[in-house]
Amino acid sequence: MADLKYKRILLKIGGEALAGQGGTGIVPELAEDMAQRVKEITTLGVQVALVVGGGNWWRGKDSMLKGMDRTTADHIGMLATVMNALAMRDAFERVGVPARVQTALEIRSVAEPYIRLRAVRHLEKGRVVIFGAGTGNPYVSTDTAGALRAMETNCQVLIKATKVDGVYDSDPRKNPDARMYDKLTYHEALTRKLQVMDATAFAMCEEQKMPILVLNLWNSDDLSRACRGEKVGTLIN
C-alpha cells in the first residue's frame, strides 16, 4: 500500500458529469472514464464510497416552479440518482473494479438496501460502494447525503469533484482574474456564499470535523495526489 493521507474517502460527483451535450442522460464512455480515474486510487489501497447526483435527469426545483409537489419532485430526483448509481456500477465492473450499489429507497431487484455495517464491510474488501437515492428523505440534497454517508462509514475526507481546480472567489470560466483559495474554513465558505455545497452539508461537516476537499477530478493524477496528501484543490476544514 502506498503512503496515504486518506485511506477511505467519499467522492461526491454531480450527475452532469455523466451527461453528454445538452447536459442530459448518461454517456457510458464518460462513466467509464470516471471509473478509470477512481480505479487509479483503489490500486493504491484507497477505499472509495461514491455519491452521484441526479441533475442529468431531473431538476426538482424547475418542476416545483410549475406547481409540482416538493416531496414528489424529490422522490423523482432520488430515483434519478439510482439510475446514475447503476450506470457507475456497470462502469466500475467494466474497468475491473468490484462495486456495489446501496440505496436509501429499497429496490431489492437492482440494488442492496443501505445497511451501514454492510457498506463498511464492502469497503474493507476493496469494493467501491455507490450510495443511491440520497438519504431517502425529501428536502435533503445529495450534498447532505454525501456528508452523512461519509460520517456513517468513517471516511477521512469528503471530496467534491468538479470541473475546476478548486474553490474560486468568482466563476473562473467567466472571470479570468478569479482567485482560487488553497484553504478555507467552513464559516468562510458559507459567509462568502461560495456555493460549494449546501448549508446543511456544511453544518454537518463542521460539527463532525469532516474535511471537504474540492478538486478537479479530470486533472490527471489530482485525485491520487490528494490521497497521498499533496497540495491539490481547496481544503475546507
Image (tube, rainbow, N blue to C red):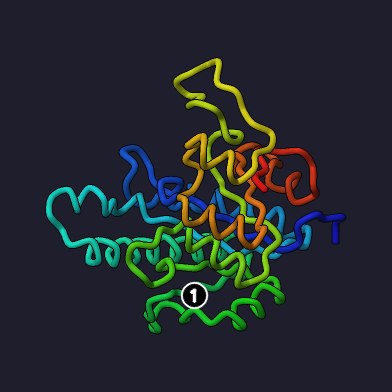
Label 1: which secondary element: strand
Q: Which residue is the site of mark 1?
A: 102
Front residue of this view, candidates 35 and 54:
54
Front residue of this view, candidates 25 and 223:
223
Q: Position of residue 4 (x, y in %)?
A: 82, 55
Q: Position of residue 224 (x, y in %)?
A: 73, 48
Q: Determine the residue positioned at 46% across, 46% down.
A: 17
Image-based side of 201 in relation to 43, left or right: left
Q: Determine the residue positioned at 62% across, 83% down.
A: 117
Q: Number of labelled discs?
A: 1
Going by the numbered disc 1, the residue's amino acid type is Gln
Quadrant position of residue 233: top right
Tag 1: Cα neighbours inside 10 Å, few (<14), some, or many (≥20)? many
Q: Determine the residue positioned at 35% across, 50% down.
A: 56
Q: Position of residue 50 (x, y in %)?
A: 55, 61
Compared with 182, 112 (above or below) is below
Image-based side of 197 in relation to 127, left or right: left
Quadrant position of residue 81: bottom left
Front residue of this view, candidates 30 and 45:
45
